[in-house]
Image (tube, helix red, strand yellow):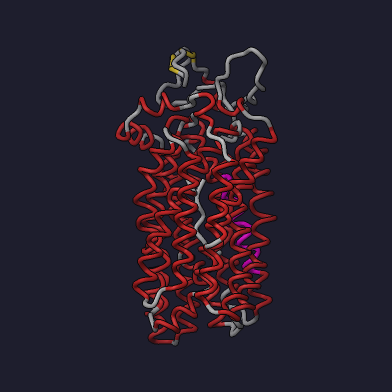
Amino acid sequence: MRLMVGINVIILCPAGTRLDSANPEPGIQHMNRLGEVAVSDPSIATAPLPHSEPAVPGKPLTNSWELFNERQRWMLVFILFLVSSSGAIDRAMVSILLEPIKQEFHVSDTALGLMTGFAFGILYAILGLPLGRYADRGDRRLLITISVGLWSILTAACGWVRAFYQLFLLRIGVGIGEAGGTGPPVMSLVADYFPPERRAQAIGFVQMSTFVGAVVGLIAGGYIAQYYGWRMTLIVSGLPGIVLAAIAWFALREPRKLHGFPVANGEAEGLGEALRELVKKPTFVNGTLAFTAFMFLANGPLAFEAAYVIRDLHVGVAESGLASGLIDLAYIIAGNVIGGILADRLSKRDIAWLCKVPGYGMLLIFPFYAVSHLVPTLTEYTVLSAIAGTIMFGVLPALIAALLAVVGAKRRATGYAITLMISNLVGVTFGPVVTGMLSDRIGHFYGPEQGLRWGIIVTLLGFYPTGWFLLRAARTIRADYEI
């Protein structure tokens, strides 16, 4: 998979309940989100958690999702699906264009890694936190609308560059736009629209948009690039997003303008206090490390997959895009849809499955990906990569839901933004660079084909620490749960 996934509960405790391992004794009191005193029950940590109750006419609303009916909830998912797809189309098209860009500007794989990783990811990561803080307080509809328009205009502008450094600088601008239009604001809205026991499925559909965009970007991008050039490909990729920005402005709704939720709580906690609370939670720490490793793999070795197919399997750009798109189609169907439903069902029995499912899944992936880069034909490569990708991206909704399950409502966007900031600074920024440097180094001795093949395989060993972090998180998620 050649894209950054953005990034982004499933069980429900009574509103405001926090399972705190530091106070396991019965009778300990704590404050819920509305400032009311509740009494902790030690059985909550292991017993299945009750579902949320639907809103009762005349009863005061205590949860933001009670403001919306099913039609409104899934309309939100549809709009966010389009928004995330637009960003994914851009990233996928850039990955399919690496080889033509390399040939025109005569740059190394390391330079390409810097453009797709550092140039895009550095400000995406740095600005993610302040934008996440704004998303916990401000108008997320406005933030998403402006961001979509910005990255779309800059993506189209990439088609008119005359030097590699100009392309590099514009990709930094695209990263700024996507920092505000994906990730924390999107997942924060999903969590406000859906009750906790239904979020994994909703997250799965929103995440599915990333892969739909990848399929469109890879197939359409490969075709346009082969017949009209890489510049026209970027122009075509960017211009529709301007229309999408207008659609987002008129179709999205901001819950805070209807109910003032949860602005008061968000304002009461400063950034330093939020960081201290999050670091106290081992599930958040291990989940963030796992997500960082995941992003390193998704944006590092897997960002070079299209270039690998062209260079090592000797197929054209259009055929490479079609093959890559078909692989991603398997991720969409078997991964996000089934993975989200499975996570919802298992987590109703035990919330630890939100970490166990992706943890065990990550441990299974490496052999499939490794062998896929050793087989001689495109068909064998496609089948093996589809199996590995289905597992990898099928467990992603559970991983995001696990993070949302422990950050708490008043710091939901902030917590997810911190995870994205770290994962982007380390994973997105350095993943392509490390893979590109390994490819150049090995290729210096054994040729560019072997260099890219073994550069990808060696970097994919990162699946094992990813699984280890998630299994560690599974031990503590019951105690760290906070609605």
Place of residue 228 in the rendered image (x, y in percent of width and height, measured from the top left)? 57, 79
Residue 359 position (above or below residue 89): above
Residue 24 visible in the displayed image: yes
Q: Work out whether residue 323 or residue 402 is closer to the camera in this orientation and state it.
A: 323
Q: Can residue 465 be seen in this view?
A: no
Span of residues in magenta: 384-398
Which of the 4 image quarters holds residue 275?
top left
**Magenta region includes residue 386:** yes
Looking at the image, which residue is at 50% across and 61% down? 298
Residue appearing at x 59%, y 82% in the figure = 313
Please, is residue 477 above or below residue 61 in the view? Answer: below
Where residue 214 sits, quadrant-wise, is bottom right
Q: Residue 62, percent across and down? A: 55, 20
Q: Is the magenta stretch mostly helix, strand or loop?
A: helix
The residue nearer to you, when weighing 172 against 365, is 172
Q: Nearer the viewer, residue 471 or 293?
A: 293
Estimate the x, y position of residue 282 in percent, counting from the top left.
41, 38
Residue 403, percent from left and from top: 49, 40
Q: Most extreme residue toward the left, as rendered?
A: 272
Residue at horizontal 67%, vertical 44%?
342
Q: Does the magenta stretch include residue 132?
A: no
Answer with the quarter of the image where residue 426 lies. Answer: bottom left
- 276 left or right, relative to 109: left
Residue 46 vertical placement versus 358 (above, below): above
Q: In this view, does 10 lie to the left or right of 290?
A: right
